[in-house]
Amino acid sequence: MSHGVTVWFTGLSGSGKSTIARILEKRLKAMGQKVEVLDGDVVRTNLSKGLGFSKEDRDTNIKRIGFVCHLLTRNGVIAIASAISPYREVRDYNRSLIGNFVEVYAKCSLDECVKRDVKGLYKKAMAGEIKGFTGVDDPYEEPLHPEVVCATDQETAEQSADRVLSKLEALGYIEKGCHSPVRGNPESAGSPPARG
């Protein structure tokens, strides 16, 4: 019997959040879990259309994702949120709203994120063509006490997903022994950056 929980991925654009989230979704579904993924880009296109990138708009976007996660979690679903969510205060707000909340910090150096940036957004931000870009001219507040830290510039996305599954098991959100670690899959932890 699984309990609803929100797995909240936070990290810089290009840190691998969406890639790990997709692997996690696939593996949880293979265990028979009910899973929904809320990706920052997809939410912005649908639920948060019209919002910009001011602090107020970013906070509104992250609170909307949090509210949907809250509804899913209380109905026994494992909700996986993947959004930059740069501000600590709003992540903490979502944690208190949802309760069953596992924060996963996709920790990746800015240099590595820039290397992975297929859309060239970092380059544009560094040239001043895009304003308010997280990690360049807008702050990213690292989590102080995340349940999981994935060093995505040092491990594969599969290894990061293993780390998250092990924590969900340890916290009792999935049954012990359901997940067997996958070793040696070279799948890249990089993904096209978003501005979420």
Image: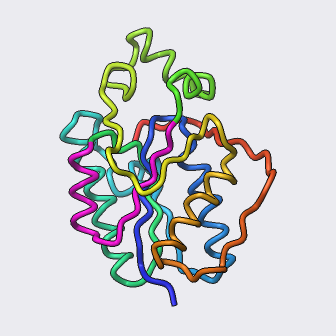
Q: Is residue 153 above or below residue 173?
A: above
Q: Is residue 182 above or below residue 50?
A: below
Numbered circles on residues, count: 0
> Can you name the residue that lies furthest to the bottom here?
1
Q: Nearer the viewer, residue 47 or 190?
A: 190
Left or right, 96 with reference to 31: left
Q: Nearer the viewer, residue 183 or 124?
A: 183
Left or right, 104 with reference to 151: left
- Residue 98 found in image quarter: bottom left
* Residue that appears at 66% across and 69% down: 27
Q: Where residue 54 sits: x, y (%)?
A: 23, 33
Q: Which residues are magenta?
A: 88-107
Q: Where residue 159 sits: x, y (%)?
A: 67, 52
Q: Where residue 127 sits: x, y (%)?
A: 44, 9
- Residue 129 found in image quarter: top left
Render colour scheme: rainbow
* Residue that appears at 52% across and 65% down: 167
* Residue that appears at 72% across and 64% down: 181
Left or right, 95 with reference to 136: left
Q: Where residue 103 sits: x, y (%)?
A: 40, 56
Quadrant where the C terminus is found in the figure: top left
Left or right, 185 with reference to 19: right
Q: Nearer the viewer, residue 173 or 7?
A: 173
